[in-house]
Image (cartoon, rainbow, N blue to C red):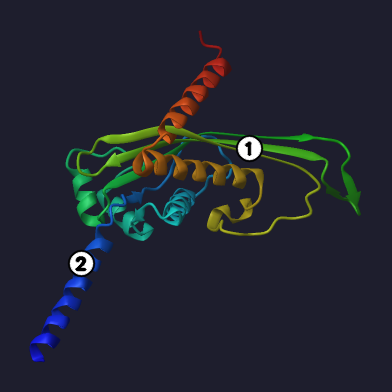
Amino acid sequence: MKKLVLGVALAMVGAAAAGSAFAAGDGRPVVGVAEFTNQSAAAWWQGGVGWELSGMLSNELSSSGDFRVVERQKMQNVLEEQNLAASGRVASGTGAKIGKLTGAQYLITGTVTAYQENTSSTGGGLSFKGIGLGGKSSEAYLAVDLRVINTTTGDVDFSRTVEGRSKSSGIAVGVSRGSFGGSLAHEENTPTGKAIRAALVEITDYLDCVMVKRDSCVADYQAKEQKRRQGDKKALKLD
């Protein structure tokens, strides 16, 4: 009887250990998101926004269920200690140290390289006691240069320019606050906020495609990138 009980106990311990091993190494990429940087003239960019965008992207990646995401504060502490710019400049051997300290296999960096907004009158606006409602159409465009750095080799395994666009028109009485916080709280449900959200979702979908799914979606993104490049050439009037 004692042997039977001991055997059952050992089996349970073994099963628990196996379960823990599976949870610790379930095959999902382990990623950390660095502080975003800005090379645009975006007026909404101010202190703290870079890490706010990092946190928002981390949430998107975690919500997808296909990534294990290193907690933002841990990444922030390590990167600041290493004095690394979020532009992705990782010296030889430094990437491995980041991976060892945080557990991240990949370091994701993002740089806002372009931001444009436009507000125009659409006519038909209403006015009540001097307060204007509607009658305007607002657009926002955001471009983010994305890089995924392998912390083992220090190489950039994936890179892409991701775009986010939004447009709103009609009568707007007010906006509600949602997942945006900190310096970006006032941009919730504005064209700017929607463009930011669109870019972050696009980044998540792209990384899910090239790092996890690796199926026909890769060809779709290659075609989308080619279309973007052609559009840029036309805008710049290049031969």
Q: Which mark is residue 18?
A: 2
Q: Residue 204 carries which label?
A: none
Residue position marked by numbered label 1 in the rendering:
140
* Whether label 2 touches label 1, CB < 8 Å: no
Residue 15 appears in the rendering:
yes
- Residue at image x 87%, y 42%? 125
Secondary element type, mark 1 = strand
- Among the two numbered marks 2 and 1 on one chain, the one whose residue lies closer to the N terminus: 2
| Whole-percent x, y for residue 192 in the image | 62, 43
Secondary element type, mark 2 = helix
The amino acid type, in three-letter code, at marker 1 is: Ala
| Whole-percent x, y for residue 102 in the image | 26, 56
| Quadrant of the image occupied by residue 87 | top left
- Are there few (<14), some (14-19), or many (20+) residues within 10 Å of tag 2? few
Residue 87 appears in the rendering:
no
| Whole-percent x, y for residue 64 in the image | 44, 53
| Quadrant of the image occupied by residue 17 | bottom left
The amino acid type, in three-letter code, at marker 2 is: Ala
Q: Quadrant of the N terminus?
A: bottom left
- Residue at image x 43%, y 50%? 54
| Whole-percent x, y for residue 23 in the image | 28, 63
- Compared with 187, 118 (above or below) is above
- Residue at image x 46%, y 56%? 63
Disc 2 vs disc 1: which is toward the camera? 2
- Compared with 134, 70 (above or below) is below
Q: Which residue occupies the foreground of this view, 31 or 109?
A: 31
Instruction: Determine the CA span between mark 2 and mark 1.
Output: 50 Å
Q: Which residue occupies the foreground of this view, 35 or 204?
A: 204
- Are there few (<14), some (14-19), or many (20+) residues within 10 Å of tag 1? many
